[in-house]
Amino acid sequence: MNKHPGVAQSLFNGFSETDTALIEQALNLLDRAGSDQASNTRPKGADVALILRGVRIDLDTLLGALLSDSRLAGHVTEIAIGAQFGDTAAGLVRDVKALNDMTVYSPDMTSQPDQAETLRCMLLAMTHDVRSVLIKLAYRIQRLRNLARENYDIRRFVAQETLDIYAPLANRLGISQFKWELEDLAFRYLDPQNYRRIAQSLADNRAQREACIQAFIDNFRQLLAEADIAGKVYGRPKHIYSIWNKMRRKQMAIDDLYDLLAVRVIVDNLAACYTVLGLAHSHWQYVPKEFDDYIANPKENGYQSLHTVILDALGNRIEIQIRTQAMHDFAELGVAAHWRYKEGGAHNAATEKNIASLRQLLEDKNAQDNLLENFHTELFSDRVFVLTPTGKLIDLIKGATPLDFAYAIHTEIGHNCRGAKINGRIKPLTYKLRSGDRVEIITVKNGSPNYNWIDPNLGYLKTARAIGKVKSWFKQQRQAENIAAGKLLLDKESKRLGLKKVILEELLKHFKMADSEHLLEALGRGDINNRQLAAALQIPEFAGAPKVTFSQKLRPQSGVVVAGIDNVMTHSAQCCNPVQGDDIIGFISHKKGITIHRRDCQNIQALDPEQQARLITAQWRSGELSRHTVPVIIHAFNAHNLLNDVTRILAYAKIHINHAALKTHPDLSAILNLTIQIENTEQLSLVLNKISQLPNIIDVKRKT
């Protein structure tokens, strides 16, 4: 037997015997789960269900409200709820739990309207059934009604969150009575002094206002009857928080506000609107500056109505709103024009259609089932709302990936991205983000994008902004690479022709180039080919000295010049594998002659004073091409296709591999050790950069 028969009876009203039995089962379940509490403690779910009856909810919403009570946590599973009360009620409970678990709000959002709006959108986008949002709002009202029991800090936090997030949600969904109560209760805790002042002023004058409005309504109804105009006339209440906002906005005292006394007139057709306006203006004095014709000049959001303020026989200012039933439905029940007007939001046809579906659901208990499905599948269907590790909300288009998220945070984070954790678990970069996901980006130092990222068939990127950033990076890289390649080509041709000096200014004039960068880029890109360059270099005025053929030059015995001598026999040290372009030094050994080391070689740094006396200056011979053995270490997320991808890049660069060893770790990450043959540090840097662009790569570097 239910412990709270009065509550049960209120909830039963209007439901069939079968429905009543389910409601009673839910109440009994709540009572059993709370058996360890005082017998007179009423479940929160029951209070919430009573609140929801005020907006004429259906059975599933009522059951969802009762079964979302926190006292049921750990006592009954979602499967059990589905078996006993149906899948819809179970789904509502699941959605309400998800909304309760979303602890993203912080008071800082008061100064960040975009973050508060994104959070409101995310809460709507996360739910599979919009009725769960209604339940959540009702639970918030229930908490506010009992908030006086909490400490000061909690009261202010909950109240501010209500004004920032939940009251605008109620307004957006068109549930005015929820919005008003949420705002008034929150205002009560945030500014108790002004709340009491306005409440007392309203209370002091309530009887007088009600008598004034009722007399005016009676008079107006009689006026309409005499003119044979069918219409509804009723008072329009004002609420404390709304009054406070208008007082602040207009810098007026409460007694000076026009619309504390307000009536609304609903008529059958457009012509009747202006007829009623004429009757009002002919029978009462009106305030010209307060007249607005929003029928002839609708607001941007489509809102239509006639607004005027008249003075009754006692001098009271009364606001009158006159509209047709269609206008009223549009403004109050149709596509939520009212909330766009209040919040200044942008027009969104999908949002309007879905809010209209919700309003129809609330108004018609027999509304078709597909209304809810339409609401969920169309509202925010093109957006996902995700969080950074610090809780900042990011709004992305549907289908966005962790890479899109990374570029939304910062371009460099996108460039350096090599992996992502979604809700604490590693996910591929092609993972499609879902609303509510918390995303953490894994980066590497000096990373760079991969060409695969901009391949639409591979699914790495969805947002135009991120794709544009990657394309821009490659354009810059190609430019730098072309300039470097052009410089190498110019140097090579100059040396081949035996030119000691090239007058660059004359070359720029010949090829009609603005500067050296454009010339070198054209050479590297192939716009100017070897034959054209060679022909230009052989024109006498472009060369700064007589030509010298290779047969006239003394070829050195070594690629290294030691102490100014270029034909000394040397060999490279195996400990550091110096490469042309490295800063080098020679070491005079007793048995192997002169060994060439990198200056930063650990063995050179560790020499004692006596051994340091055997060091000798060394430098690479300019223009000498030779191959050097270099060890490289590559760290990847997994071994799949790693060796194949790396060898493909090296083969394309015509770089020989001496040795390769692949090691896989228990977490599936892999280490690939390579020994390759390269010409100089520039070539090494270029190939390591290309390897680092592979999507699987965490890090790649020369082994020291």
Image (cartoon, rainbow, N blue to C red):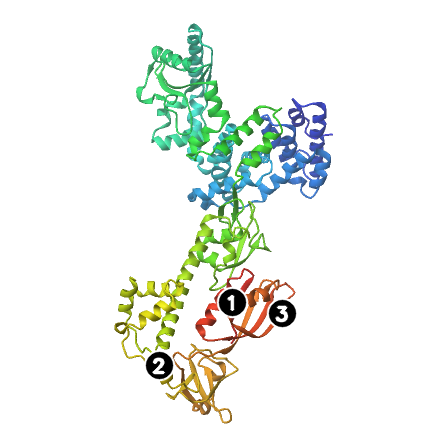
Tell me which residue sits at (39%, 70%) in the image. 489
Query: Where residue 591 sits: x, y (%)?
Result: 51, 93
Residue pointed to by mark 1: 652
Q: 348 or 14: nearer the eye? A: 348
Farthest-out residue, left: 541
Q: CA distance from mark 3 to mark 2?
A: 51 Å
Query: Where residue 610 sits: x, y (%)?
Result: 45, 92
Residue 366's disc is none
Q: Are marks 3 and 2 in contact (CB under 8 Å)?
A: no
Disc on the earlier residue, 3 or 2: 2
Q: 126 or 213: nearer the eye? A: 126
Q: 437 or 555: nearer the eye? A: 555
Q: Which mark is in front, 2 or 1?
A: 2
In the visual, does 245 lie left or right of 546? right
Asked if one can make out residue 133 in the rendered structure from this viewpoint, the answer is no
Disc on the earlier residue, 2 or 1: 2
| SS for callout 2 | loop
Give the amino acid at mark 1: Tyr
Tell me which residue sits at (57%, 36%) in the image. 377
Q: CA distance from mark 2 to mark 1?
A: 32 Å
| SS for callout 3 | strand
Q: Which mark is in front, 1 or 3?
A: 1
Q: Residues within 10 Å of mark 3 (few under 14, many from 20)?
A: few
In the visual, does 86 lie left or right of 513? right
Give the amino acid at mark 2: Thr
Residue pointed to by mark 2: 549
